[in-house]
Amino acid sequence: MKRLLHINASPRGTRSRSGMISAQVLAGLTAASPALTIETIDLFDADLPPFDAQAIEGRYGLLMGTPVPPEQAAAWDKLRTMAAHFLSFDGWLLSVPMWNFGLPYRLKHYIDLITHPGMTFRNDAVGQVEGLAAGRTAIIVAASAMPFGAMPAIDGLDFQLTYLNAWLGFIGVTDIHAVRVAGTFGPDEAVAAVMAKAAADAAALVTQLAARAAAV
């Protein structure tokens, strides 16, 4: 990777558990590849345009190839710019807390803005879909209060990592890596153990990615 986009979906700043582990990943990747360029988008500070009636009506018109009013065309120009920015990176690091078993709404908003035909995927006349983000790398740091990944009885409630894997796959990403920070609610010693495991997993992932890059 030469350019990495860090998509931070937590509003908690330095208190974010996903952010803490992501910071370690970023530091490790930078140490392994000093030329790596990293850009961060903090979704709770970002100016995300609304995906409202104006944008939706424009979507149908553009898909059908019919003229759309200038204001609708302008809305879609913004979305195309966002999608092109997303695809301009070789990889992405997503720092994601779990909210109500799923994603923070700002991350879902961002995904909804860039995931459209001709922007991050395309489909042909018979409905075959081709993701336009193929060949890139995605790293997900997924934090949750509950110990997902270590308690099979609750894994059916995981609409965080499951969704992100599905979405990334849909837009063509096959090189997906995940670090769980799971079980962040409980006694201090239990949370400390969770953070230590996540830090070790993150370090192992950085080593793996660095070795792969060196072998190219």
Image: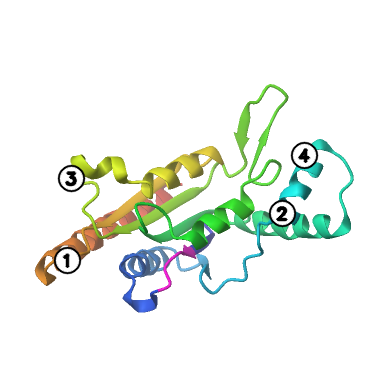
Q: Secondary structure at mark 2?
A: helix
What residue sits right under mark 1 in the picture? 191
Q: Give the CA separation, mark 3 to mark 1.
A: 16 Å
Q: Give the CA separation, mark 3 to mark 4.
A: 44 Å
Q: Main secondary structure of the magenta part?
A: loop
- Going from the N terminus, do you reach mark 3 or mark 2 first? 2
Q: Give the CA separation, mark 3 to mark 2.
A: 41 Å
In front of the other: 117 or 52: 52
Q: Residue at x 57, y 58 (%)?
A: 110
What residue sits right under mark 4 in the picture? 63
Count of numbered marks = 4
The crowding category of the residue bearing disc 1, from other C-alpha atoms within 10 Å (few below 14, some 14 to 19, many at least 20), is some
Q: Residue at x 35, y 50 (%)?
A: 178
The crowding category of the residue bearing disc 2, from other C-alpha atoms within 10 Å (few below 14, some 14 to 19, many at least 20), is few
Q: Nearer the viewer, mark 1 or mark 2?
A: 2
What residue sits right under mark 3 in the picture? 151
Mark 1–mark 4 contact, CB under 8 Å?
A: no
- Going from the N terminus, do you reach mark 3 or mark 1 first? 3
Q: Give the CA separation, mark 1 to mark 2.
A: 44 Å
Q: Secondary structure at mark 4?
A: helix
In front of the other: 122 or 133: 122
